[in-house]
Image (cartoon, rainbow, N blue to C red):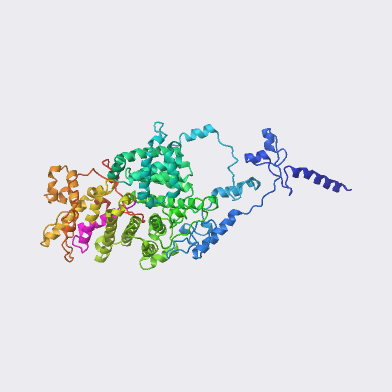
Amino acid sequence: MSPQADSDQSQSASSKPAAAGGQSTTGRILACALCKQRRVKCTRSFPCENCVRAGVQCVQPTVQQRRRRFAERALLDRIQSYEGLLRNNNIPFEPLHGYQSASVPAPVSIRDDDSDPGCGRGSKEHEARDVWLSIKRVALEDDDDDEGDSDGNSSKFSNYEPPDRNIAAAIQSHDHLLFGAPNPNIHLPSMHPAQVQIFKLWQVYLDNVNPLLKVTHVPSLQARIIDAASHVDSVSPPLEALMFSIYSIAVRSMTDEECIASFHLPQDQLLSCYQVACKQALVRCTPWRSNDRDCLTALYLYLLSVGQQVDPRSLACMASVAIRIAQRMGLPYEPGSSISGCKTLEFEMRRRLWWSLVIFDNRLCEIVNQEKSTSLSPTWDCRVPLNINDFELRTDMKKPPATHEKTATESLFVVVWSELANFVRRSITHLDIIGAGKPSPEMVKLAKQEGGELRALEEMIESKYLAYCNPEVPLHHMTMWSTRSFFARARLVDHYLTYSATPAEQLTEAQRGQGFAHAIRMLECDTKIRTSPLTQGYLWHIETFQCPVLAYLHVLHGLAKRPGEEYADKAWIAVCENYESLVNGPNQTRSQMMFALKFSPVVMQGWEARQTLRRQRGQGPEEMPQIVLDSRIKAMQMHGIGPSEWSSASSGGDFIAADLFPNLHTNIAVGGGQSPSVVFPSALLPGGPSTPSGGRGGQEYGGAIASTMGGPFFGASSAGQGLIDTGMGEQFWSDDAFKFV
């Protein structure tokens, strides 16, 4: 036998024990057990250098049958790309993970364009990329990933040794940035109301709050609350925080009279008690570093409950924290392989919570004039919630139920608002305002059609949702009129942007009439909601998300400058009726005091212009409406005139706008060469002969109230409209005299 053969035989013999130890059958040497556990680079010698340096025994792993692994991520990317092509071409299909309804989109479908990088989700090279996934692919060895799960989700952190417990305790002891450290004097179980009252508050939540938010799944949560009500000492921290937030927002949606009748305490005391407990419960469940959806929901409901009691600038910062938590949890993005273990119920609840948070955040950005900071942008792909009922979602479902195409479900309000927000975030107007890039070609095409984007959206909403509403159902009534108010405000904003380069005095009668028609429509829709007995439980939502300040600015300034226009009578009726619905509404109303306080100059100016015009036409004086009476009384208060002289306000007295507001501009175009208008019917005025309530003209108000500046969530802000004339600048927000009612 030749020496070369002897050498080959010896090498073959020496390779066998290696295969039985650390070498695979293919001759590939595996990392030793200690290096694999420590996740460090092994020299793959026996013993390896790391073990020699550490002075420990080097143990080579036993040979295991290597599982055949597919490139799951690449495969899922290809499937997702194919699904996108099918969806963009309106081809029905069954999605891989069951989170997308395969039905053909509505006539107005807002889809992503694969060729336009300005849309936020363009072609492959413009898609959001997972940095940690790239690190995993590049930095880790192939054999380091052998123990990953079958879904392709590597347990790359599972073998890390836990950090030093003292270090972890030291970090967590300072982890109370938002609500401070836990208060040892507060015993949370004793802060819960009695069991009967828990169920009362839960029912109020179901009636007043849940239909408008749908951020909790009632069938599954109700069973948990019933069980927790019997064992308040052993409730988990996330559920306890959620329960206290439900108590808070339920009380927030009630009137003071309802709170006294049901719980024998005024609303402010109940709110104070439950909000303190909710803060302590949030400290315990730490939503800022938790991935529990209940924690984030509790934080969101808490922020809604305190919205009327804090400066909007502070609330906007807290809402930004909630948005950042939601982004960390992945709520803005459709679930893929990274959370494939989630059920259909979890998918849907994540969508609902994200859309509700985004609309709330955008609303606050409008109020504080920070539209460019809004999270309502086309950079994420969370889909609109499904138009389904809660009982159709079960915890064990793997595929979503079919969405209702021609039925108004209990999710109607949430779905419609999400549709509106989804359209807005891709609209040309909104993208121009926030500076978020170019609109998609589809939106450009819609804008060129007759009526533009808004007409296409309105036709879709009317035919797909509102056509199946029953106006005698509270939720349907709320949805119909709030949606129509949205379109009125959106058209008013579009009117401003269209004629922004044209001076106001150069606008034609028709152009001015269009703006007034939209503003009056806003006021009429808002009045429909506030005065209807069907929607009294929903007024908290109106105060949080909608307020017709923009309409008041437009109408009152127009009436002061041109009291003889043909729309003047209708405008005065709309203003007076809406104002009465504000001041005679529940005491929770946040904006009701703002009008008499901040619009007093322009209200008195407009009323005097109207009366001057009537005198020129030989007509007698009108009975003073409530908004003018309140404006005069507020002006007298500001000038130190006591209550004994208020009686002169109702009769006109000797006070005029120029006396009470010397800096007020009085260049009023009386008549303006227009045709005479019909005499304003005083019987239709609030507090007039046909109004049995008689108003609250002589009542002293409790001071200033923080304003809400815009409508639901259409791109432009009203903060820049008429701030100088109405005094709603920095001083408005920093006034120490704020008293919230």
Nearer-the-camera pick, 721 or 182: 182
Examine the rendering and report whether any part of residue 662 can be seen: no
The answer to whether 18 is drawn above or below residue 562 in the figure is above
Nearer-the-camera pick, 554 or 483: 483
The answer to whether 33 is drawn above or below residue 480 in the figure is above
| Residue 552 belongs to magenta span | yes
- Image coordinates of residue 7 in percent, x first then y, are 83, 46
- Image coordinates of residue 120 in percent, x first then y, are 47, 57
Examine the rendering and report whether any part of residue 223 can be seen: yes
Which is the main secondary structure of the residues drawn in magenta? Answer: helix
Nearer-the-camera pick, 224 or 651: 224
The answer to whether 446 is drawn above or below residue 148 in the figure is below
Please count the marks in the image: 0
In the rendered structure, the answer to whether residue 702 lies left or right of residue 711 reads left
- Image coordinates of residue 226 in percent, x first then y, are 43, 43
In the rendered structure, the answer to whether residue 46 lies left or right of residue 227 reads right
Extreme residue in the right direction: 1
| Residue 13 belongs to magenta span | no
Extreme residue in the bottom direction: 450
Which image quadrant for residue 494?
A: bottom left
Which residues fall within the magenta stretch?
545-574
In the rendered structure, the answer to whether residue 130 lies left or right of residue 667 reads right
- Image coordinates of residue 735 in percent, x first then y, are 27, 42
Location of the C terminus by quadrant is top left
